[in-house]
Amino acid sequence: MLAEAALYLDDPDFRRNALVESLANPKNTYSRQRLDAYALKTQGWDLLPEWNPQSVPATTAMAGELRAHRPLALDPATPRLWDGKRPTTMAGWVALGREVFFGYPLRVEIFMNWALEHPDVGERVGVKPAADGTYPGVRLFSDVRGRTALGITCAICHASVDDRGHVVVGDARRAFDYGALRLAYHADTLVPVDPDLARRMKTWGPGRADVTEDDDEDPVAIPDLWGLRHQSALTQAGTIKHAGPTVLAIRQETQLLHSNHQKIRPPRELAYALALFLYSLEPEARAVASASETKLVPRGEELFAAECKACHSNAALGGPPIPAERVGTDRALAFGGARGTGKYRPPALVRVSAAAPYFHHGAVPTLEDVLSPARLEPTYARSPLGKGAVAGHAFGTDLPAPDRAALVAYLRSL
């Protein structure tokens, strides 16, 4: 990985070839945007200015300033996020990547001003402070024009804050309801919003958002980041063939410049560092299972090998993308114009017990429901998305109830 860093950073032909080889469907919008603009040397995104921002964590003290209707100010002496020195060790790359994960603004986000200024709204939509008084994923920064603003970073979706105020890095923030936050802002400020967009945002719910590059209605659940280095594809639809850190770095580089409206690009050192940081993430220790459940684990492991291992086959118990027809779940994302490939990627099952709701669109509330035949019936009423059958992924639903219980026990042990 250290040797590959130099190739990614210094050789545009290497970057271009890596991009081309990584795109599972070169005709979707995600691929076309990158093929038209990435690693072209004398045109496209290579001509964008590098942006190494000044950025500090948003705090409860800043929230108080907003409530007092005082403008937020960034100290002009605030250092840049990166000191300009390329790391030479894995530890150095990972440490820099952590700074990027928490500190590199994706864009100005006026809605975060509203969440901090109105703590009841913030709490309701999953924007709350950690024990140290900072808001993970929310930063005060100086934008490319030198204006001070609040923005969001990777951590707004991929770092949760538990009831003790502890930050769990890599854990999907399933309480984050971006649609509800935006709707609250528009309702309270009377700033107009497109009625169709408002209707769509209302359907997202906590832990889901539609951030793809088309007008299709295909909101997805925020994923955990555990086991990412073992996955052979990136995104739920397997949009990107994941051959190594360069591919993930290109994903992060282009995501950051796209989120910043293609006005800047991050220094590539920051994109590569972010990729290596994501590779380094490991889940925290899980809760100890009950004695009765522990007894079921060996049988559950046998059932997993027989029923599930064909798809969940890698070291993180994820696997290569599967044709969407075989999975049978909602088809919108798999065949969407933005990132569609006709396939779905089996998610990694690291800490799957804490990853509810399940499926790419967050339609199933518990592991028991994933395996329950009742989920496939029109009378099913437990889905966060409303009453009705949640079709697809019927694997294991035909097992006897004791076997389903054993399989759930094994999954909870992961």
Image (tube, rainbow, N blue to C red):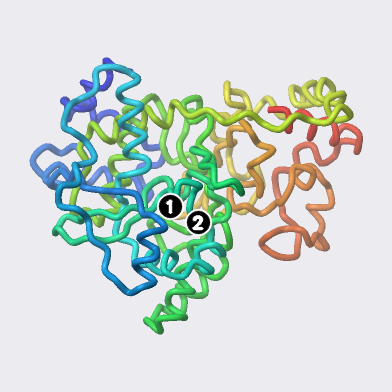
Q: Which residue sits at x=42%, y=50%?
A: 134
**Are circles 2 and 1 on residues that touch, CB within 8 Å?**
yes
What amino acid is labelled 1 in the image? Tyr
Query: Which one is earlier in the sequence, the residue at label 2 or at label 1?
Result: 2
For residue 128, which numbered disc appears in the image?
A: 2
Residue 65: % across, % down:
34, 66
Answer above or below: position of 9 versus 342: above
Residue 184: % across, % down:
48, 74
The residue nearer to you, when weighing 386 against 179, is 179
For residue 412, which numbered disc appears in the image?
A: none
The residue nearer to you, when weighing 198 against 288, is 288
- Element at label 1: strand
Answer above or below: position of 344 versus 197: above
The quadrant in which residue 350 appears is top right
Q: Which residue sits at x=41%, y=53%?
A: 338
- Element at label 2: loop
Residue 319: % across, % down:
57, 29
Single out the residue that lies furthest toward the bottom.
Answer: 190
Q: Which residue sits at x=19%, y=53%?
A: 75
